[in-house]
């Protein structure tokens, strides 16, 4: 079962409660595939405790596989102020279909800790995955980090930050925090751009709040400031009519990465908003993701 079937599964999960009996019969192939999934699920593992908050993650590992497998680290969106890992479940289904392991990450939202806490947590989640790779058969050479919106931003900072940024101190260690690729779904790339002016966004203002050095913190957590040679390959998916995260963020990142010689791709969805893509657009996107991962040697 290929891309079309797992996209169908995503739509099935979203509308199953309102589908008629006859329509359900047409989806029997997807339902049959879903019934064959054999995954070990380990929920709510605490990977760090910070500011009296237990940051947790869920682990999905394929059963009956002895060798390490490619692993997705997924980070949910919500403007750093909302959302949760449980609400992001549909976004990991394509990777389960491919037989990958998945680590679904929660992190501190603004109401718990302001910036840069979310960035620090996600870096700690990556360290946790590397430290526990043998136990869960994570292939540390095939770690892919991904997320939507704020999760896209956090996937970028998780995979791009150098140790010199000083945002790894909540979970200090000697591991090399490397990923094989980043799949960025319309993530914020320049946080300062959203704090004032025509692109001001309330979620960004809330995340930085009244920090006395908020411009400096915003710069420290902005992926655009960490573009350099040697970064992992990055695929950005962005609608050019996105009202929530300006499309220019994806364009600016793509241009900077290209100039630095970093393998990258900007997949533009014409007329696309902030997600909510059609089935046809989703098919195109996941075909591009699979081709991108194949080109990087992560999948065959």
Image (cartoon, helix red, strand yellow):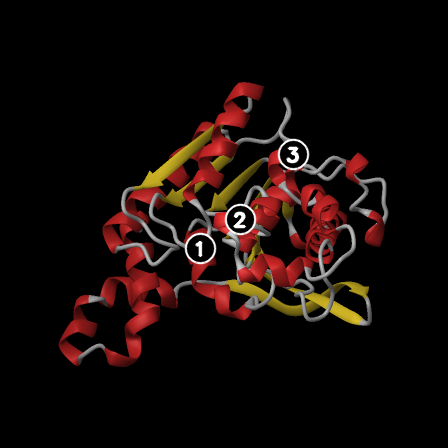
Give the class, few, some or many, for how many residues have Cα within 10 Å of label 1's Cα (few <14, many ≥20): some
Name the residue carrying label 2: 197
Q: Position of residue 168 (x, y in %)?
A: 80, 46
Is residue 140 visible to us here? no
Q: Which residue is mark 3?
A: 225
| Number of residue marks | 3
In percent of width and height, residue 79 lies at 55, 60
- Name the outermost residue toward the left: 22
- Disc 2 secondary structure class: helix
Give me the C-alpha separation between circle 1 and circle 2: 14 Å
User: Quick one: 253 or 208, which is closer to the camera?
Assistant: 208
Q: Earlier in the sequence, mark 1 or mark 2?
A: 2
Identify which residue is drawn at 85% across, 45% down. 173
Residue position for label 1: 244
Tags 1 and 2 touching, CB below 8 Å: no
Q: Is residue 129 left or right of residue 24?
A: right
- Badge 1 marks a residue whose secondary structure is loop
């Amino acid at each position: 079962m290929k891309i079309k079937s797992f996209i169908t599964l995503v739509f099935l999960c979203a509308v199953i409660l309102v589908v008629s009996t006859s329509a359900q019969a047409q989806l029997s192939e997807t339902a049959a595939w879903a019934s064959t999934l054999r995954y070990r699920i380990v929920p709510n593992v605490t990977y760090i405790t910070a500011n009296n908050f237990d940051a947790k993650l869920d682990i999905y590992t394929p059963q009956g596989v002895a060798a390490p497998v490619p692993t997705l680290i997924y980070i949910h969106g919500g403007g750093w102020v909302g959302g949760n890992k449980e609400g992001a479940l549909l976004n990991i289904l394509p990777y389960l279909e491919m037989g990958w392991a998945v680590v679904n990450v929660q992190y501190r939202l603004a109401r718990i800790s302001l910036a840069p806490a979310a960035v620090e947590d996600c870096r700690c989640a990556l360290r946790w995955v590397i430290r526990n790779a043998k136990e869960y058969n994570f292939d540390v050479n095939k770690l892919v980090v991904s997320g939507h919106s704020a999760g896209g931003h956090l996937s970028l900072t998780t995979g791009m930050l150098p140790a010199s940024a000083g945002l790894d101190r909540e979970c200090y260690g000697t591991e090399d925090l490397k990923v094989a690729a980043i799949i960025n779904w319309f993530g914020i790339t320049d946080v300062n751009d959203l704090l004032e002016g025509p692109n001001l966004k309330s979620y960004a203002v809330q995340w930085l709040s009244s920090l006395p050095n908020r411009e400096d913190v915003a710069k420290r957590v902005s992926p655009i400031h960490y573009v350099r040679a040697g970064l992992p390959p990055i695929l950005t998916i962005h609608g050019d009519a996105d009202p929530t995260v300006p499309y220019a963020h994806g364009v600016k990142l793509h241009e900077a990465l290209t100039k630095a010689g970093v393998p990258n791709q900007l997949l533009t969805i014409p007329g696309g908003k902030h997600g909510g893509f059609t089935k046809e657009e989703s098919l195109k996107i996941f075909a591009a993701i699979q081709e991108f991962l194949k080109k990087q040697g992560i999948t065959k």
